[in-house]
Amino acid sequence: MKNLILFSVFVSCLSTTSSILKAQTLASNNTKARARYNKDKVYATTQRKIFNITSWAGASISDLLAKWGNFTRKNELPNGIMVYSFEYTYSGSGGKYTPGYTVTDQFGNVLEEKAGKDNTYSYNFTEYYDFYVDKNQFIIHVKTGNR
Amino acid sequence: MKKIFVTIILLVVVKTMSAQQSYFTCDEIAVYLNKGSVTINLPNLSKEEIKQKIQSLIKERNYVYKPYYSNESLVSFRDFARICDKSKCGSDLIAKTIFHLACNAGFVKITIDYEIYSSFYGAELLINDNDDVASKNDVPFAPYEFQIWDKYADEYPEAIYVFNKKGKTKVKNGEVQKTILNFFNRYITDIKSYLEN
């Protein structure tokens, strides 16, 4: 009788472990599938932003200027292609600095000490859009990024 | 008689081998043109004649001429085509290929730039005149992964290679590798045949 009970407990444990493992595998597979979906989604979203800007390729430069206004500068390449650049500079800073302190007694023994904390930050970058224009005044290529 | 027979057999073998010539190699990272380029000899054609033939090829095949990359001695064009379907490769694979044909009297040298995209979720891909790719309604897609960690093998059925924790790599999907290589090979075979005839 005792053996029968032990055997039942053993079988029950095995079954539970197997169920848990199966559930964990399913969860893990779902997580991996979700990971791929998220990765592909982020790529599609990023590409869309670039795509929308670079879809000016094929249009005339006058249409772009009518919509975007004045360019930052214009350069002519040796092969006669004109580059119209639009640049937007972003800069700023933030965060704060909290100085540290040390408390000592009259004998110079340190009673309390706290290190300073520096959470300050600053940034400065230029977002650029370069439009390459051929002799017929059509945009043949667009480059964008930060410099 | 026997000599003629042997010569014919040899000619057939050589012809068959050259017809099946592989111009590309594939590894865990990418597909490469063997030696980085392919040179086609066209001894009876001038530089201008070669350039004209390339322009006709672009028109007939519906490729897109790329003035940004082209110059006096270089003609560049682009194709955007499906390599294979999800049913065959595990995911829809689409290639953006930019061909650069450096022309000179008597020969043309081909190099390519390409990107393969994997559309596992059925995204319909769009390409603009700047060669940038997006998907209709922003359905997820991504650049093709030639190799994947073996733990993710089921999530990336289209990957050719898998690697394990020890960094050991093995071919998981030889059929996809063959399909990709054949796809790119067909381009070169076609360009060669078009320019030679």
Image (cartoon, coloured by chain):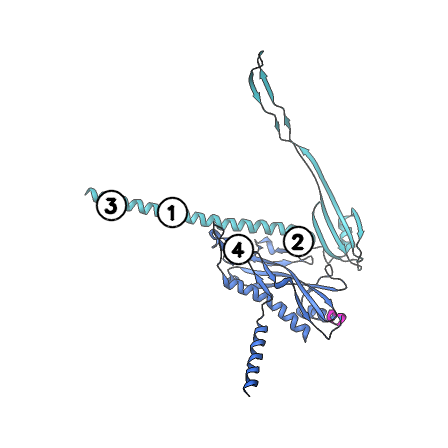
Chain colours: A cyan, B blue
Residue drawn at point x = 77 percent, y = 55 percent:
A61
Residue drawn at point x = 55 percent, y = 77 percent:
B13
In the rendered image, the quadrant that contains the C terminus of chain A is: top right
Q: Are marks 2 and 1 in contact (CB under 8 Å)?
A: no
Which residue is the site of mark 4?
B147
Magenta span: predominant SS is helix
Q: CA distance from mark 3 to mark 2?
A: 65 Å
Of the numbered discs 2 and 1, the one sitting upstream in the chain is 1
Residue B115, above or below A102: below
Measured as percent of width and height from the top left, residue A104 is found at: 58, 15
Q: CA distance from mark 4 to mark 3?
A: 47 Å
Which residue is the site of mark 3?
A7
User: Element type at marker 2?
Assistant: helix
4 vs 3, front mark = 4
- Residue kind at label 1, given as amino acid type: Leu
Graded by Cα atoms within 10 Å as few (under 14), some (14 to 19) or many (20 or more), the crowding at tag 2 reads many
Q: Which residues are magenta?
A: B47-51
Q: Are marks 3 and 1 in contact (CB under 8 Å)?
A: no
Q: CA distance from mark 3 to mark 1?
A: 21 Å
Q: Residue furthest top?
A: A106
Q: Which mark is residue A51?
A: 2
Graded by Cα atoms within 10 Å as few (under 14), some (14 to 19) or many (20 or more), the crowding at tag 3 reads few
Of the numbered discs 3 and 1, the one sitting upstream in the chain is 3
- Residue kind at label 3, given as amino acid type: Phe
User: Element type at marker 4?
Assistant: strand
1 vs 4, front mark = 4
Q: Which mark is residue A21?
A: 1
